[in-house]
Amino acid sequence: TVRELAELLRVPPNVVMAELLKRGVLATINQTVPSEVALQVAEALGFLAEIKKEEEETLEEEIPDHWEKLPRPPIVVVMGHVDHGKTTLLDTIRKTNVAEREKGGITQHIGASVVQLPDGRKITFLDTPGHEAFTSLRARGAQITDIAVLVVAADDGVMPQTVEAINHARAFNVPIIVAVNKIDKPGADPQRVRRELSELGLIPEEWGGDTIFVDVSAKTGQNVETLLEYILLLAEILELKARVEGPAKGTVIESKLDKQRGPVATLIVQEGTLKVGDPVVAGTTYGKIRAMFDDKGRKLNSAGPSTPVEVLGFEELPMAGDTFIVVEDEKKARQIAEIRKQKKEQQEKLSRGLMLEDVFKKIEEGELNELRLILKTDTIGSLEALKKALTELSTPEVSVRILHGAVGGITENDVMLAKASQAIIIGFNTRPDLKAKEAAEREKVDIKLYSIIYEAIEDVKNALRGLLKPVQ
Ligand code: GDP
């Protein structure tokens, strides 16, 4: 881009733009410049330049796209308020798994598991319930979840983490299926759950909306198979597809160092087929797949789309959220890992979350057309007042969107959501706990604290107009 070129040449962007104009190229700061022209500009400004083809950029191009895309199993996360039955539901689902029972496999914890219905159709579940895992993977750029199952206990109804879960799923456009749980309990009131969720915009199909609700008991197993059917139905509607042939790529969802086996990582294959012996790059590390196991601990030689596998053979630990890709040979894998390492170091110097002070600059440069905020306040009253006032600050150029608003302290979850969605956190008469503070520093997320509503509104208003004084 013009900006990058200007930074490389250490001149203001308008100097580069002027040089471009001389060569008949009209480009704004964020537009990319053909490399030939960039070369000329660099030379005009007294630099010797050459075009270096980056290994990594050619990677994707090398995968031929003549392979057919076929339906693949959905990848599902279970979310909901604490004690509403997420863990029990996942356990029951794994037990209803007929195919597994027949083969007598014992579930291993590798971070995800595959459930197979009697007719052979499969669903992949992420093992860690809750939106935290999903959001922190997302914060590292991984897009793996297709569907979120929202568990709401029928004897308890919508609770704060229910709302949080909905907002996290919505922030990433992940469709929600509601599992109204604990219907075996005497005090269960599934209709109340429907009413409460309708108020939050999740309207049951039977009421004319488009959200699937299934009444279940995770404890007795009642209707759990129906829930699985609906998940597969939604998957069909979403037309989830992937190519089966060709080199694999996907995401790392867990990794650990094993004393005997060295780095162990769980990968979810998203495209292609992963095979033992494949040279692979993940994040800034690389390796060769030495051995591969499924979620039942069985040895595998190959794994297709939506399959979670535990693999051995990485040189170093990849990170959860890293993407992986299979390449021609180990030498290439090492080279790409090196390039990525260097890039990452550069980026780490530059990258930080969105700061309120930078908002105007980003709007001007056309990088921002939606200011996303997470609001945490001391009372419902102040929450509603702030929500309304802040949303009303939207201009034709930039709309203000409240991604998540709730009463209570600022948590690590809020920070991870902010990081994943480039949002700013606003706290009113509330503060971050220690973990949230640490996370915000680590992830460079902006948290603004206020005790006067007017000041919060003024700051956001000024940020949108470019009147906020930058902090050094
Ligand atoms: P999580 O925190 O959402 O993972 O919730 P758990 O799965 O740990 O469940 C919390 C409690 O609710 C446990 O004591 C479960 O036995 C109980 N529970 C979960 N599902 C049901 C259900 O369908 N019916 C009844 N009666 N109890 C349930």
Image (cartoon, rainbow, N blue to C red):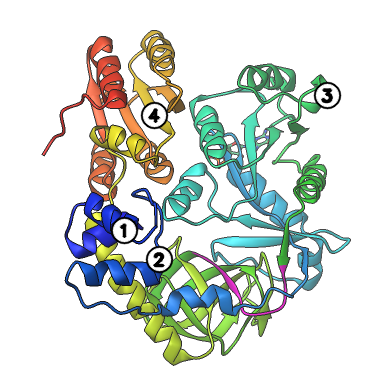
Q: Nearer the viewer, residue 145 or 423?
A: 423
Q: CA distance from mark 1 to mark 2?
A: 46 Å
Q: Amino acid at mark 2?
A: Met
Expressed as whole percent of the image width and height from the top left, the position of residue 310 reads 55, 74
The nearer-to-camera label among 4 and 1 is 1
Whether residue 249 is in magenta: the answer is: yes
Instruction: Determine which residue is flagged by label 2.
Output: 319
Expressed as whole percent of the image width and height from the top left, the position of residue 355 reads 27, 37
Expressed as whole percent of the image width and height from the top left, the position of residue 69 reads 76, 67
Circle 3 Cα neighbour tier, 10 Å, few/some/many (<14 / 14–19 / ≥20): few
Instruction: Determine which residue is flagged by label 1.
Output: 22
Identify the mark nearer the N-term, 2 or 4.
2
Whether residue 248 is in magenta: the answer is: yes
The nearer-to-camera label among 4 and 3 is 4
Identify the mark nearer the N-term, 4 or 3.
3
**The magenta segment:** 243-252
Q: CA distance from mark 3 to mark 1?
A: 64 Å
Identify the mark nearer the N-term, 4 or 1.
1
Dot 3 falls on a residue whose secondary structure is: helix
Identify the mark nearer the N-term, 2 or 3.
3
Expressed as whole percent of the image width and height from the top left, the position of residue 218 reads 70, 41
Q: Amino acid at mark 3?
A: Glu
The nearer-to-camera label among 3 and 1 is 1
Q: Is residue 426 visible?
A: yes
The reply to whether the C-beta atoms of the residues labelled 4 and 3 are less than 8 Å apart is: no
Q: Nearer the viewer, residue 140 or 219?
A: 140
Q: Amino acid at mark 1?
A: Lys
Q: CA distance from mark 2 to mark 3?
A: 43 Å
Q: CA distance from mark 2 to mark 4?
A: 27 Å
Instruction: Determine which residue is flagged by label 3.
Output: 206
Instruction: Tell me what residue is drawn at x 66 percent, y 74 percent.
Output: 272
Q: Is residue 410 visible?
A: no
